[in-house]
Amino acid sequence: MLRFDLDYKKERRIKYVRTNNRIRAPRIKLVTTGGEVIGEFSLREALNRAKEEGLDLVEVVPNAAPPICKIMDWGKHKYDLSKKTKPQKSQELKAIRLSPKIGEHDLLVKVKRAIKFLEKGNKVKAQLFFKGREITHKEVGMSILNEFKANLGENAKVEQEAKFVGREVSMIFSPVKKA
């Protein structure tokens, strides 16, 4: 039986894993599904034990004398290995830029875009930039961010409340897990 493992460069390396009738050794050391070593058996006896349990006999350590074989569900084991090698989907931080002079319709368009990002599983950072003397009216910027938050509604939860950094105020939203 062939097993493909992917390393960090995503090159394929083939490892030969003998299962059931492909095992060549006349005597083997047998390990149960729980990891308990039963003892040394003939290949025929070990195959019979595996068939009684409805599982496969897999050669785990072929270079040992006698080889060590384990009774396990080979298909499930291969599936678990393939799940481990798949890359995890990482969350991206998507930025939505706002200004204190944004119109109501423009704000709703930005909210729709943010909802699309959140539905895809990404985080959203709403950034409001102040230009020139706009910085003197921070309450206008806060009201716009609060309206943005209210329009998102149940689609997002606030991960970071409004935070002022220089001429910018920002909030970070994360997607809500749906049952």
Image (cartoon, helix red, strand yellow):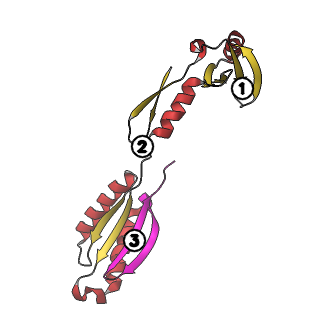
The percent position of residue 14, horizontal first and vertical second, equals 45, 27
Write down the residue under mark 2: 8
- The three-letter amino acid code for the residue at tag 1 is Thr
The answer to which image quadrant residue 134 occupies is bottom left
Q: Tell me the crowding category of disc 2: few under 14, some 14 to 19, or many 20 or more residues within 10 angstroms, Cα based.
A: few
Question: What residue appears at the point 71 percent right and 15 percent down from the top-left corner?
Answer: 49
Q: Which residues are magenta?
A: 154-179
Question: What residue appears at the point 34 percent right and 85 percent down from the top-left corner?
Answer: 138
Q: Secondary structure at mark 1?
A: loop
Are the residues flagged by discs 1 and 3 in contact, CB closer than 8 Å? no
Write down the residue under mark 1: 32
Q: Is residue 34 above or below residue 137?
A: above
- The three-letter amino acid code for the residue at tag 2 is Tyr
Observer-nearest of 161 and 60: 60
Mark linked to residue 171: 3
Residue 35 falls left or right of residue 23: right
Question: What residue appears at the point 70 percent right and 11 percent down from the top-left corner?
Answer: 48
The mark that comes first in sequence, 2 or 3, is 2
The mark that comes first in sequence, 1 or 3, is 1
Q: Give the mark toward the camera: 1 or 2.
A: 2
The answer to which image quadrant residue 33 occupies is top right
Q: Secondary structure at mark 2?
A: loop
Q: Tell me the crowding category of disc 3: few under 14, some 14 to 19, or many 20 or more residues within 10 angstroms, Cα based.
A: many
- The three-letter amino acid code for the residue at tag 3 is Met
The percent position of residue 133, horizontal first and vertical second, equals 24, 89
Mark linked to residue 138: none
